[in-house]
Amino acid sequence: MTAVQPYILAVEDEEALATLLHYNLDKEGYRVEVCADGEEALIRIDERQPDLVILDWMLPTVSGIEVCRRLRQRSSTRNLPIIMLTARGEETDRVRGLDTGADDYIVKPFLMSELCARVRAVLRRIRPGLAEDHIRHGDIVIDRSAHRVKRGGHDVHLGPTEFRLLDYFMQHPGRVFSREQLLNAVWGSDVYVETRTVDVHIGRLRRALSAQEGSDPIRTVRSAGYALDI
């Protein structure tokens, strides 16, 4: 982590999940506070604004979606990063959550490794000064400041595109991305590149990551795309 320790407010009324959130985020090096209802969350944010809010959709007193709406109406919290948690997995619910102003949206049940990756991604995108220089997944470590990758303690030599691909995969471990999604995320939506290009760079990334350790951490999902195995 960088010297700055981001402060995260987790708003979750399920006690067991709230405990897990606190434990895992604290282990990642964040300062964490937890509260259990929307009204208390608004009070806490007024008293001390966090660097990021993890916000459950269904909360007592004031719902998470209403908390998000109110925060977006205030000039002081208009750009406060918000990740919503919900058991509502329908596409219309996801769109509603994002339209209300959430920066990301995670459907329960979820893996804590995915949540932590999403937190890092949102902080890096919105508050880059708070993002960490090192990101680890299993035995793979990326050092963004030095633009270096190690696996099992051995240097992995990657080209710039393979480096960006790996960085993106490590922000979302276990998540399957189509070639089109990877093109937009890594190359940019305003650049025309053949989808076949993704396969070429995935192949290069695989060979580089497997050169020393042997095992291939990139999983191909037939007719869907690619994922970094958890």
Image (cartoon, grey):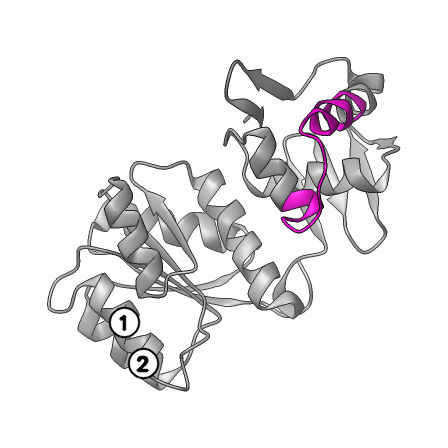
Find residue 218 and report its horizontal and vertical position in percent: 64, 22
Name which residue lies at 20% across and 50% down: 14
Name which residue lies at 84% across and 18% down: 211
Rounded to the nearest angstrom, the CA distance separating label 1 from label 2 is 6 Å
Q: Is residue 194 magenta?
A: yes
User: Image quadrant for the N terminus?
Assistant: bottom right
Find residue 96 and report its horizontal and vertical position in percent: 27, 56
Secondary structure of the residue carrying tag 1 is: helix
Q: Disc 1 marks which residue?
A: 69
Does 69 sit left or right of 120 as displayed? left
Identified by mark 1, the residue type is Arg
The one nearer the camera, 91 or 107, is: 91
Measured along the vertical axis of the image, is residue 62 above or below residue 211? below
Name which residue lies at 71% across and 33% down: 140
Crowding around mark 2 (Cα neighbors within 10 Å: few <14, some 14 to 19, many 20+) is: few
Measured along the vertical axis of the image, is residue 130 above or below residue 172? below
- Magenta portion: prevailing SS class: helix
Measured along the vertical axis of the image, is residue 160 above or below residue 47? above
Name which residue lies at 63% across and 31% down: 138
The one nearer the camera, 69 or 223, is: 223
Q: Are the two marked residues, 1 and 2, in contact with CB atoms closer than 8 angstroms?
A: yes
Crowding around mark 1 (Cα neighbors within 10 Å: few <14, some 14 to 19, many 20+) is: some
Q: Is residue 47 magenta?
A: no
Q: Which residues are magenta?
A: 185-204
Identified by mark 2, the residue type is Gln
Q: Disc 2 marks which residue?
A: 73
Tell me which corner region of the image, top left, top right, bottom left or bottom right, holds residue 158: top right
Residue 228 visible from this viewpoint: no
Tell me which corner region of the image, top left, top right, bottom left or bottom right, holds residue 82: bottom left
Find residue 183 and report its horizontal and vertical position in percent: 65, 38
Secondary structure of the residue carrying tag 2 is: helix
The one nearer the camera, 100 or 153, is: 100
